[in-house]
Amino acid sequence: MVNITYDTSGSIIYTDDSGTQTVYQNGDIAWTLTGTALVFIMIPGLSYFYSGLLRRKNTLSMIYMSVMTLAVVSFQWFFWGFSLAFSETGSTFIGDLKYFGMKGVAAEPSIGSARIPSLVFALYQLIPMLALGAVSERGRLGPCIAFVFIWSTLVYDPIACWTWNSNGWSFVLGGLDFAGGSPVHISSGSAALAISIYLGKHRGYGTERLACKPHNTSYVIFGTALLWFGWFGFNGGSALSANLRAAMACTVTNLAASVGGLTWMLWDYQIERKWSAVGFCSGAIAGLVAITPGSGFVGAPAAVLFGFMARTVCNFATQLKFVFGYDDTLDVRVLLSSNLCVVGNVLMGLFAQASVVGFDGITVIPGGWLDHHYIQLGYQLADSIAALSYSFVMTTIILWLMHFIPFLRMRSTEEAEIMGLDEYDMGEFAYDYVGLEQEIGHEIETKVKEGMTSGGREPHHEHHHHHVDENSLEKGQ
């Protein structure tokens, strides 16, 4: 009979049907729950980072999409997401519905670590998707809700299963992924590319009039600070225990972000002779993404190279969208997919060390090239290419199936782009003066139309103000 008791120190003692006891240390549970809270802080961090890079009239819609995604994925994870990703009775590709509705997820040891209960593990593994940055400024908000649920089920859950589930083909093969390289970043980056291609270009793409610059650099810095802070839980918490491996993961996370930010900023200064805050923030995020899969596998010296290579590859990779002609406003694909796939996973195949992994006192791996385990690089490439290809193809299929259902079509109208998604889809604004400008513009436009209909001649000053307002709307003023 299953029994849950507590010892004199307050630690949980779980006894299964066979009488086997498992003792959970309170410190491990507390650290994992703290890591969960830190990961959730990254949601507003990501929303402010993204929204600061957009035009004013789309600020609130970007923040909304981030928190909406958290809510939808939370329900999907409870409904069947956790079971599809982590049920131990599933296939090598995807799990089954053993834990449907979180049934049976409580005090039994988790499949991720025997040091914490499965309930704590399930909560920690709840990670929202990142690909919706590609929807910014030209995607309908309503269909995004359905897209997030479907994508999480058909794309994220299978990749998480084959990467982290003990039955998954990549896990069995020997692929390494500490905190979410393939399931989180590569899948989202590849999906962002598919979304950008499907949605097509912004209205007036490539013209000087629509050249978008960050409307609020303070938001970008604030979002970066929250992301940097939360990433300690994202990477350090993935140790699922308060131990030396978690400390090393936090150390290399901070180091890679610092080197990535400084390197990007210095490269930008060499080109522009300006100290760019946006450049520093972009480099820091690139470093954080690059180190994520290897944060529990590599030492501090390797983290410096992760941060340096993250910037060097990503900064130049941003130019690919001009070469191939796709429209990715926030450069989500190159910051996540290219960075992590080319830099993070590949470098981990080179620099993974058995000694670092052994800091938790349990895990044993043969290591990477530093430990003369040369095949590890092949495992990392196989996992990366599989995740990138699968996510791109499945995301494209999902988008086109939704396209033929009118109320689920993702592409917004030209009118919505001109007005901004804040007004068109939400009727709310991040800034009061933007809403006031919109109202004045509509009133003037109405008067002009009434004057034209009555055959009268519109006053010169009204025509002038209407023209200026339209331009200001295009620039997001």
Image (cartoon, helix red, strand yellow):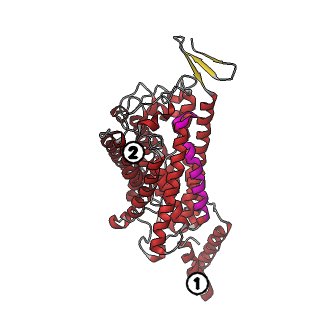
Relative image position of residue 98 (x, y in whole percent): 46, 25
Viewer-nearest residue: 321 or 68:
321
Q: Amino acid at mark 2?
A: Phe
Q: Position of residue 374 (x, y in %)?
A: 30, 41
Work out whether residue 387 can be spotted: no
How many dots with numbers? 2
Q: Are marks 2 and 1 in contact (CB under 8 Å)?
A: no
Q: Position of residue 4 (x, y in %)?
A: 62, 18
Q: Above or below — where is 119 with respect to 381?
A: above
Q: Nearer the viewer, residue 287 or 392?
A: 287
Instruction: Classify 417 as above or below 395.
Output: below
Q: Magenta stretch: dominant SS?
A: helix
Eye-nearest disc, 2 or 1: 2
Q: In which quadrant of the rendered image does the C terminus lie?
A: bottom right
Q: Amino acid at mark 1?
A: His
Mark 1 surroundings: few (<14), some (14-19) or many (≥20) residues within 10 A? some
Which region is colored magenta? 218-244
- Rendered view: 402 above or below 24: below
Disc 2 is placed on an element classified as helix
Kindly identify which numbered label has been placed on residue 351.
2
Q: Is residue 316 visible?
A: yes
Please name the residue that numbered disc 1 is placed on.
Answer: 463
Q: Earlier in the sequence, mark 2 or mark 1?
A: 2
Looking at the rendering, which quadrant does residue 382 occupy? top left
Q: Which mark is residue 290?
A: none
Q: Answer few, some or many: residues within 10 Å of disc 2's Cα (few below 14, many 20 plus, some between 14 and 19).
A: many
SS category of the residue bearing label 1: helix
The foreground one among 4 and 421 is 4
Q: Looking at the image, which residue is at 39% across and 64% down? A: 316
